[in-house]
Amino acid sequence: MTDIQTRLTKCFSEVFSDMTDTEIQKASTKTVEKWDSIETVQLLMLIEEEFNTQFELDMNDLIPFGSYQSFLDKLTKPPATPKKGLITDLDGTLWEGILDEDGIEGVVVNKEYRDL
């Protein structure tokens, strides 16, 4: 077991004290009857403190935190790098129309650039 797994298992043990380490590593909201949103929030708090991190989450959607493996993945996999882009077309080269004036239907990509 890696250091991260050991520390994560310790956090789970504090919430699910009656489970063995092996059971914890296979645990999910589908396999552990008493695992509900309260336990998920407790786990989030313990894990954030243990790993000195903060998860981005929507309290209305705790599904991404529904298993031991999902927490492990969040802790070990690097976050996706956001892709950003700024496209400008000052002279009507890429498309015709002005969104604010012509609406979405009035903005048409020029034929030469449709495959970009």
Image (spheres, rainbow, N blue to C red):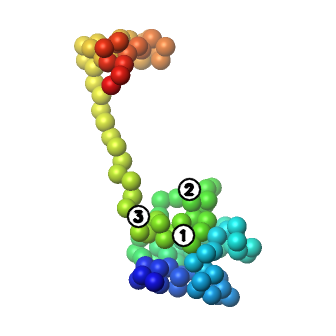
Residue that appears at 60% across and 60% down: 62
Return the residue at label 3: 77
Tell me where residue 93 sits by quadrant: top left
Return the residue at label 1: 69
Query: Tag 1's secondary structure?
Result: helix
Q: Earlier in the sequence, mark 2 or mark 3?
A: 2
Q: Earlier in the sequence, mark 3 or mark 1?
A: 1
- Check disc 3: other Cα within 10 Å, few if <14, some if 14-19, many if 20+: few
Using the numbered discs, state the Cα–Cα distance from disc 2 to disc 3 in whole angstroms: 20 Å
Residue 58's label in the rendered image is 2
- The kind of residue on which mark 1 rests is Gln
Q: Earlier in the sequence, mark 2 or mark 1?
A: 2
Q: Quadrant of the C terminus?
A: top left
Q: Are marks 3 and 1 in contact (CB under 8 Å)?
A: no
Query: Tag 3's secondary structure?
Result: loop
- The kind of residue on which mark 2 rests is Asp
Q: Quadrant of the N terminus?
A: bottom left
Using the numbered discs, state the Cα–Cα distance from disc 2 to disc 1 in whole angstroms: 19 Å
Tell me where residue 50 sits by quadrant: bottom left
Q: Are marks 2 and 3 in contact (CB under 8 Å)?
A: no
Q: Are marks 2 and 1 in contact (CB under 8 Å)?
A: no
Tell me where residue 89 sits by quadrant: top left
